[in-house]
Amino acid sequence: MGSAQELSIDPELTGSSRTMLGIRFSISTVVGNESSKEYLTQWFDLGAGRLRGTQELFADAAAWQNFVGLVGDGLHGFPGIGAGSASTVDPQKPASLNFDSAGDALVEFGENTVAASSAGNVVIKLSGTVVTPLLSVSGQQVRDAGMRPTGLPARQPSPSSSAPDSNSGTGDPADGAHDIDGPDVDCRKVKCVALTFDDGPGPKTGQLLDALKQADAAATFFVVGTNAEVRPKVLARMVAEGHEIGNHTWNHRVLTSLAPDRVAKEIGSVTEVVEDATGSAPTLMRPPYGATNTTVKKAAGAPVILWDVDTLDWKVRDAKRVVSNALRDTRPGSIVLMHDIHSSTVEAVPAILKGLRAKGYHFVTVSELLAPSNPRDGAVYGRGPAPGKAKR
Ligand code: NI
C-alpha cells in the first residue's frame, strides 16, 4: 500500500475503586488523508477478575434498550448531527461510557464516527437521575468508581483532575483520572468490616458466594479440613472471587487440649488441602472455639484471628436475629463471626450486606482489615469468646 498509515492508542485511567477499574482508550487512525479518532472505555471488574461489557452495566435488556434510546435522542439533538446519521451506540462494541463526579453519564463518540469530522468529538451527557435506575450492580460500581475513586493514597491533584465539568455535552471524561497505587481500601480512612464464616464449606456456601458477589463484598472463610477436602471447587471459587481462606483445623477440636504434634497435624493437613485446591496456603488461622495457648500460636503459621462480634448464629438459627445481631454490634474495624454451614446464616447474609452498606461499611477480608497493623504470624487479633460464654 502506498498511503501512509498510522495508529496510535492512548490509554488513561478514568475511574477506580476497590471493585472497578476504568481505562479509557483514545484510538487515532490515519490512513492516507483520512483521519479518525475513536474512544472506548473498558471497565475491569476486580472482584470477578474480568472485563465487563457495556451491556453488563445495565440491569436487563429493557434497561439497555432504554439507555441506547437515550443516547440516540442525545445524538439527534446534538448540533451538527442530522437525523439520518448513525444513530446510537453500537451494541457489538464497548461504548466509551464514563461517569463524572456528579454521577452523570458521559458517552463519547470520536471524530468521524457518528458525525462528520467537522463536528469533532461528540459527548452525550445523560443525567444521573435518569441513568442510575437503569444500572446493574456492576454499573453502579462503575458509576461509583467514576464519581469518587476510593482508597487511593492521597496525592497532589494533577492539573487535569480538578474542575468537575457541568456543561452539557462538553464534559471531559478524563476529569476523574487518577493513578493506580497502593491497597484498594484504606481501612484507616473508611469504615470497614470483615465478615467471617467458619466451619464450612457447606452445602449452602455456593449460595452465600452468590450473595457476596451480587453485593460485591469480600469475606473470609475459616474452613474445616473435613469439609474443605470434599469441596475443592468451592475453595477455588472463593479465591477466584476475591475472598480469603483461613485455616480452622481438620477436625475442629479444642487445640489447647491436644499435644503439640497433634496441633501441628490439625493445622498442617488443612494447609495442604487448601493449597491443592487453590494454589495457595491459608493466610490466617482461627482456632476452634477461639481456644489458644502458646502451642497453638506457635503452630498457627499465620496470624491467629478471633472476632469481636458474635452473631450467635450457631445458637439462634434464625436469619432475622442473625441480621439484627450483626447490624447492632458491628463497629468500624469489626471482625464478625458467622458459620456458613447453617442455612439460616446464609439466608441472613443479603440483609446484613444491605444493612451494613447502608451504614457506609466496606466489606473487606480480614487481611485487608488488619493490613495497617502489619499482622504477625502467631499473634492474636480480635477479642474472641466473651468470658464464661459457651462457644462454638
Ligand atoms: Ni468453628
Image (cartoon, rainbow, N blue to C red):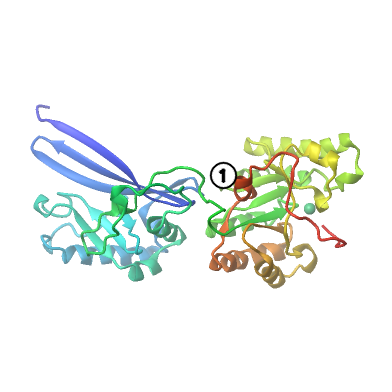
Does the Cβ of the disc 1 residue fall within 8 Å of ligand 1?
A: no
How dense is the environment of label 1, judged by Cα within 10 Å: few (below 14), some, or many (20 and up)? some
Residue 382: % across, % down: 73, 53
Could you tell me if residue 93 is visible in this image?
Answer: no
Which residue is found at the position 30% from the left and 68% from the top? 127
Residue placed under numbered mark 1 in the picture: 240
Q: Residue furthest top?
A: 2
Residue 115: % across, % down: 14, 54
Q: Secondary structure at mark 1?
A: helix
Name the kind of residue labelled 1 in the image. Ala
Which residue is found at the position 81% from the left and 61% from the top? 386
Q: Is residue 52 above or below residue 133?
A: above
Q: Is residue 231 above or below residue 211?
A: above
Viewport quadrant of the N terminus: top left
Which residue is found at the position 10% from the left and 30% from the top? 3
Could you tell me if residue 316 is visible in this image?
Answer: yes
Of 335 and 188, the residue lying toward us: 188
Residue 50: % across, % down: 46, 45
Residue 232: % across, % down: 67, 42
Q: How many marks?
A: 1
